[in-house]
Image (cartoon, rainbow, N blue to C red):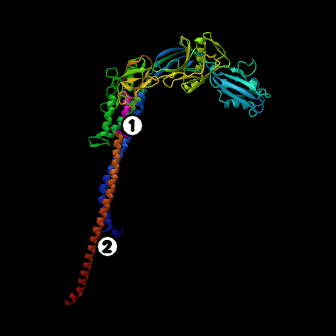
């Protein structure tokens, strides 16, 4: 820069300012061109980002429409105030039910007969309390560290025995109150007390069948089961929420009395889902129109006018919403137009004829469901379609079964006990179900016929807390030949019932390992399939068109079981298309990557421009320096000549 600041000394013209102006002029055109390239690329990246967001937002309503129960919506219309009904639309069906609530479930409550002058200092006695709540037996100890009413209540609450303790101030002293955590007779509490010698008093908190009347705790609220009659059939449950009686319905009992429950198809929810899809689709079309519009009067287009990526996206989405769904060619509903959803040829937006949609939904529910969601129809009534995989293609797939699924069980021959089985006191039967859940049972002592024994065991299993918590089921049955069996409710190789311990059953029930269940085996579309219980499936990694499909074989014969006709609805196809578009290898990512490379190229061009301008500046400086030096020499020569001429001037004057 020192050399630049010295420019112009000789000429007074070729200065550093002139160099700067020439360099700026040389650079300006290139800078403007590169800035415009960068600004356009950045604007297009932003536009594609907005497009990606709009396409991604379309995926959620399409997924909701693609759910198997999206078109199956039912509502409960209840006349009468005794019951409220929750409906699982995926499992419910139309129906009318008369519900008569006879009894509401309630939890047991107990209270001490005695009052205590102080809750923290008055002794209650020492020893142990065994609390039996259902199948749960909990023992707590009262000693010098917690020998008070508050200490007793704390010990019960800390034990998590299925019963809660509290202390109330009656005004005349303090009383202990207990309440079962769960409703129903199965959750009633029994308390057995063993007192420590020399520390009496704890027996007043006992409550069981052997406690004499007027002693121990008193029952202030009786444990009751909920009782209702459903179309004249009596139903009993431990809670007021009764489920599993009618598929897809939960009856919540609120008060005694009779009600009529009508389960009817609800078309409003499917309409809302369709309208949400149309709104998002039209928002996307409006954005595309904005990004690609062209003004013929001004001859100007928008950021993405004529962009091939946009045209490709539009074409793919248009095919999804206008094409006939493969597999529905001969049906009453083949495309969105058949249910009142049409496309505007000018804008590409969708229009919705709600009345036509509702009519088709009521008259052709199955076909409308297949239009949006995937559907599999089986020829065999004991073959049930479950789901497809991401690579499943529409088509008909043959089903062949070589082995049916079975359930694990353990059995005992009671033919020698026709006169009855003597159950002693105490008795205990320990089962292990499906290799994961341990169940402990005990029966009242007495003599049981084989039929009575089965009924008593089944009753205990139905109320068993461990089984309920795990969701497992064990069925007890007696064959015509006198064989008693415990059978798991689960099918397959993980299904098993074994007896881990047995005492007090007169030798009729003993420790014994059971037989493990079997998984279904067979082929789908000629490919060897895998089995998981009753589910026969092909993994998604299979190469055939049936890859990923799953069916449930409920029973029937071995051999050919007909075929599954699979249709992939519009929603699933749209979700797949959208996922492909926004994926890391999709069209949007490829276009955005290209624009980012354009920005990188602009930066590289800027770097090359910097080098070129530096070279241009250096060349100017060299040229100006040489010219300035030459001008300086000329100026010096001119000055010398002028001086010589001035020196000669006086002599010439004298001669004259």
Which of the numbered marks, if any, corresponds to residue 9? 2
**Prevailing SS of the magenta stretch:** helix
Q: Tell me the element at label 2.
A: loop
Q: Is residue 11 magenta?
A: no
Magenta range is 566-586
Local crowd at mark 2 within 10 Å, few (<14), some, or many (≥20)?
A: some
Residue 603, placed above or below residue 173: below
Q: Where is residue 475 shown, x and y percent of the image?
A: 55, 18
> Could you say which is closer to the camera, residue 325 or residue 24?
325
Q: Tell me the element at label 1.
A: helix
Local crowd at mark 1 within 10 Å, few (<14), some, or many (≥20)?
A: some
Q: Kindly indicate the quadrant of the structure image that contains residue 465.
A: top right
Q: Where is residue 641 shown, x and y percent of the image?
A: 24, 81
Q: Is residue 18 left or right of residue 130?
A: left
Dot 1 and dot 2 residues touching (CB under 8 Å):
no
Q: Kindly indicate the quadrant of the structure image that contains residue 510.
A: top right
Q: Give the quadrant of the N terminus.
A: bottom left
Q: CA distance from mark 1 to mark 2?
A: 66 Å
Which of the numbered marks, if any, corresponds to residue 54? 1
Q: Where is residue 134 shown, x and y percent of the image?
A: 63, 22
> Could you say which is closer to the camera, residue 346 or residue 329?
329
């Amino acid at each position: 820069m020192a050399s630049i600041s010295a420019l112009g000394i000789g000429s007074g013209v070729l200065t550093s300012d002139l160099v700067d102006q020439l360099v700026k002029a040389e650079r300006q055109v290139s800078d403007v061109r590169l800035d415009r390239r960068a600004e356009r690329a950045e604007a297009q990246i932003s536009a594609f980002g907005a497009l990606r967001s709009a396409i991604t937002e379309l995926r959620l309503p399409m997924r909701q429409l693609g759910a198997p129960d999206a078109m199956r919506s039912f509502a409960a219309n209840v006349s009468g105030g005794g019951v409220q009904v929750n409906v699982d639309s995926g499992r419910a069906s139309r129906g009318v039910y008369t519900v008569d609530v006879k009894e509401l479930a309630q939890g047991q409550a107990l209270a001490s007969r005695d009052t205590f002058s102080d809750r923290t200092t008055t002794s209650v006695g020492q020893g142990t309390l065994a609390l039996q709540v259902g199948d749960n037996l909990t023992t707590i100890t009262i000693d010098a560290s917690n020998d008070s009413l508050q200490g007793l209540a704390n010990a019960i609450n800390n034990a998590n025995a299925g019963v809660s303790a509290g202390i109330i101030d009656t005004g005349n002293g303090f009383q202990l109150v207990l309440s079962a955590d769960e409703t129903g007779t199965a959750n009633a509490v029994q308390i057995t007390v063993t007192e420590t010698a020399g520390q009496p008093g704890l027996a007043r908190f006992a409550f069981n069948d052997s406690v004499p009347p007027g002693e121990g705790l008193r029952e202030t609220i009786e444990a009751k089961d909920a009782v209702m009659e459903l179309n004249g059939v009596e139903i009993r449950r431990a809670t007021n929420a009764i489920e599993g009686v009618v598929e897809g319905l939960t009856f919540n009992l609120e008060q005694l009395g009779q009600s009529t429950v009508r389960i009817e198809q609800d078309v409003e929810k499917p309409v809302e889902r369709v309208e949400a899809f149309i709104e998002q689709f039209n928002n996307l079309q409006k954005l595309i129109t904005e990004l690609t519009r062209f003004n013929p009067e001004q001859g100007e287009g928008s950021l993405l006018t004529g962009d091939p990526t946009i045209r490709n996206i539009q074409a793919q989405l248009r095919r999804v919403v206008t094409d006939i769904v493969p597999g529905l060619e001969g049906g009453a509903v083949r495309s969105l137009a058949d249910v009142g959803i049409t496309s505007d040829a000018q804008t590409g937006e969708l229009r919705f004829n709600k009345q036509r949609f509702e009519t088709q939904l009521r008259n052709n529910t199955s076909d409308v469901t297949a239009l949006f969601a995937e559907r599999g129809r089986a020829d065999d009534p004991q073959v049930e379609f479950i789901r497809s995989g991401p690579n499943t293609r529409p088509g008909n797939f043959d089903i062949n079964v070589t082995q049916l699924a079975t359930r694990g069980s353990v059995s005992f021959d009671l033919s020698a006990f026709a006169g009855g089985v003597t159950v002693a006191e105490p008795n205990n039967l320990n089962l292990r179900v499906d290799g994961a859940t341990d169940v402990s049972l005990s029966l009242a002592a007495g003599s049981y016929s084989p039929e009575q024994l089965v009924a008593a065991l089944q009753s205990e299993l139905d109320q068993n807390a461990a089984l309920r918590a795990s969701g497992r089921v064990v069925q007890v049955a007696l064959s015509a030949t006198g064989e008693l069996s415990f059978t798991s409710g689960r099918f397959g190789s993980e299904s098993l019932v074994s007896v881990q311990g047995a005492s007090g059953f007169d030798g009729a029930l003993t420790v014994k390992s059971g037989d493990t269940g079997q998984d279904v085996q067979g082929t789908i579309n000629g490919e060897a399939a895998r089995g998981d219980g009753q589910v026969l499936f092909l993994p998604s990694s299979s190469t055939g068109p049936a890859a990923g499909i799953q069916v449930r074989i409920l029973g029937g014969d071995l051999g050919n079981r007909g075929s599954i006709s699979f249709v992939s609805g519009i929603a699933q196809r749209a979700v797949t298309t959208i996922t492909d578009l926004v994926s890391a290898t999709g069209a949007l990512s490829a276009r955005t990557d290209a624009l980012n490379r354009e920005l990188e190229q602009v930066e590289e061009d800027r770097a090359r421009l910097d080098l070129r301008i530096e070279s241009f500046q250096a060349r100017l400086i060299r040229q100006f320096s040489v010219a300035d030096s030459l001008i300086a020499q000329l100026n010096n020569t001119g000055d010398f000549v002028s001086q010589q001429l001035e020196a000669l001037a006086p002599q010439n004057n004298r001669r004259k």
